[in-house]
Image (tube, rainbow, N blue to C red):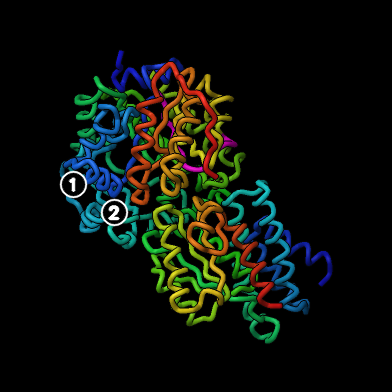
Amino acid sequence: MTMTARERLLTTLDHQEPDRVPCMMYLNIDLLAKIRKHYGLKTNEEVYQKLSFGGGWEGGDMGTFAELSPPRAWKPTPHDIQLEEMTGWPKDGMMGYTWCEEWGIERKIAKKLPGAEHAQFFFAKFPWEQFDEVEQVEEAEFPDLDALGRWDMTERLVKETKDKCIVWADLQHTLWAKAWALRGMHKFMEDLHKRPKMADAILDKLLDYWCDATDTFLDLGCDGVCLCEDLATNHSLFIPPAMWVKYFKQRYKTLFDRVKKRDGFIFFHSDGNITPIVEDLVDIGIDLLNPVQPECMDPFEIKRKYGDKITVSTGCSVQMTLPFGTVEDVKRESLYALKHLAPGGGFCYGTSHEARSEVPVENILALYDTMKKYGNYPMKIEGYFPLMT
Amino acid sequence: MNEKNREALKSAVIEFKSDEVGGLVDQALKAGNKPLEILEALNEGLAVVGEKYENGEYFLSQLFMAADTMKMSLDILQPALALDSGEAESQGKLVLGTMEGDIHDFGKNTLSILLMASGIEVFDLGVDVSPVKFVEEFQKTNADVIGISALLSTTQPTSERVIKELEARGLRDNVKVILGGSGVSKGAVERFGVDAAVSDAAEGVRIINSWMKVNRK
């Protein structure tokens, strides 16, 4: 019997086999345009519908992601408008995204590449970079959680999608990633190594804020929280594992305990190779680890060691196979993963991160065609699938 | 330079004692040590940091802290090196930038500091740099190496346009090109025609230094 995306992911998180492997879908705006053109579709929702076996929203089976909405009284600045136009974030899509930078972090936008609708952006100015005193951190203001309209998106997504899929409270950059976005990467690294009181003050301030926000997200009906922390490069963690344990482990646990007390789930996203701290993350109660990028970590080892405690959400490589491989490479990598990782549940598959404009349409279609054909439980995949190197 | 002072300078970099390194360099200069000897001691420390990073003992924040310590020491040492003409000879030249369409610069900046510390002249073009600009800067500076930083798979293929531009101007054999970025794989050498592809700054430093050594022979 076909499950809803909600039933599918709940079954997966319970380490049982659902009807098929939940499908992760993370496609950037230029790739979506290429797929629309390929199929003659008008909207991105139609693309998601077509690729996600009827799921029909950004993210595929993984659910919807409720962010803090801008206050209703918020007026976009020229920079906000420019960011929205240049980066192509949809204003009226399922997620209802409207660019709103209330933290004072400024972004720089790169030139668009030929033929692209989407331009890359990155943090460029950090509002706390010049802070010398802990008191300055303590006195800094964060976006008001009680502002009128702050919970509009959450209320809408819970109402419109919770019967179909999991609704995550999207905390986005929470502790590590928000701390350096406010302080600057270099300055925050110096804090961690040389100014522990400053590092503690920043992290405590963020933790308090996200604990408060989490309570409301859960009050309004979210099923759990999603953190996007990006703790590592492909090679290794940004900071030593012992330093991560010292500054972050207990703070994450405080937040996670709050969610667990209310039977919520923890979706933990980090780019790069975070292998040295996966055990710590499992210890403090994460339910789903994403994206376990195959070019950075070994998803097979992670599933073997922790597969009875966490759901491994990984995918076909967006750094190598999807952009630079052939259709056959994509099929082989997907089949190999489905064959070895899917049995027993606790596993999601799709794109290993955001698939971008350089990915050939035929490769992305090969990924989802393979999932449609071979991603059904019980797994019946035979054969040997050599991987792209 | 006596062994004790040498070790003190070296360990200041390894243990990123940024508060102490300036004083140590100053003391070593006042004691009559040659600036180049001081630089060598500091560089020995930096080499140890690079090894520790590559074997997984050190992490990026430690690499950065050590590079920052090195930069602070160079701020004090540079005038003495410049005065001591002949000793401050350039170890090679590098044109560096983040590829057009991308503005990530943490890896590029770390590489830049590490190379400057090795005595290499770095012409940093910043971020979002067009292929033509890389080549023009190479022609202007007569650099030994072009370093392209590209975190995103989206912008990695643009490195091929640098190669094509060099070929079109008949300059391809005059310069080595290295592509770097967290998501860069070795396959990029064949894919885009660059001479080396690396996924972290420490490996990039090692390769660029080895090319510079060959050029100096």
Chain containing mark 2: A
Q: Which residue is mark 1?
A: A74
Give x and y (percent) for residue B109.
51, 63
Q: Is residue B123 magenta?
A: no
Tell me the amino acid under the disc marked 1: Trp
| Left or right of A258 in this view: B62 | right
Judge by depth and name the residue closer to the eye, A373 or A302: A373
Q: Nearer the viewer, mark 1 or mark 2?
A: 2
| Left or right of B206 in this view: A35 | left
At numbered mark 2, what does the secondary structure look like: helix, strand or loop?
loop
The tag on residue A156 is: none
Give the quarter of the image for residue A275: top right
User: How far is the residue under mark 1 from the one under mark 2?
Assistant: 25 Å
Range drawn in magenta: A265-277
In this view of the protein, can residue A346 be seen by the observer? yes
Judge by depth and name the residue closer to the eye, A32 or B182: A32
Instruction: Write the residue at 50% across / 48% down.
Output: A198
